[in-house]
Image (spheres, rainbow, N blue to C red):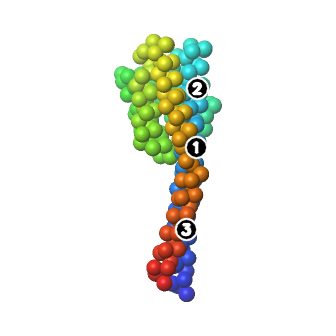
Amino acid sequence: MLRIIALCIMTGSCVSLGFLKSMGLSRRLSQLKTLKRIEMFLHGEISCARTPLPDALWNIAGKVEEPFREFLRELSEDLNRYGGGSFGEVFAENVECHLKDTKLTREDRDRFSELGRSLGYLDKAMQLANLEAYGRELDMTIEELTKGLPVRKKLCQSLGIMGGLFLAILFI
């Protein structure tokens, strides 16, 4: 009886891991789309409204969900305090602090940090050009992920199920 319960728990755990990984892939796509929205909002704030970066980041924070809202508000507050660091340094520190627990990959966070290094000290035209370049990279990443997402999700789910069944058979 105890053995059957242990096998059920083990199988259920493997299946759950497969489905959690599948959900993580969907969450990464959603978070990349949020980064794209941030890029578009920032482009609009710089090009049309000509809002200073700390104020622009605070305004954008109200339009996005957590953890990006907290990231943008903290970044805005850090910039207003101005502790002597450059915008890029403050941006990278906040990315590491607030976005490390997201489903974004290390590469995604590094590219976002690189965007922060190119903002804040350049003229308006260069900032907009860098935002557009980042937006194009983000579009390509989102498109690639969207194309392969259904197959990868199904693969994760199937591997979870098969792994659970394999372990159950192995321990029988």
In the picture of the structure, the residue carrying the numbered disc 3 is 161
The image shows residue 170 at horizontal and vertical percentages of: 45, 79
In the picture of the structure, the residue carrying the numbered disc 2 is 40
Q: Nearer the viewer, mark 2 or mark 1?
A: 1
Residue drawn where x is 59% and y is 25% of the image: 41
Name which of mark 2 and mark 3 comes first in the sequence.
2
Q: Please report contact status of discs 2 and 3: CB closer than 8 Å, yes or no.
A: no
Q: Amino acid at mark 2?
A: Met
The image shows residue 19 at horizontal and vertical percentages of: 57, 60
- Give the CA separation, mark 2 to mark 1: 20 Å
For the question of whether residue 100 can be seen, the reply is yes
Residue 15, above or below 148? below
Q: Amino acid at mark 1?
A: Thr
For the question of whether residue 94 can be seen, the reply is no
Residue drawn where x is 46% and y is 15% of the image: 126
Q: Nearer the viewer, mark 2 or mark 3?
A: 3
Q: Under tag 1, what secondary structure? A: helix
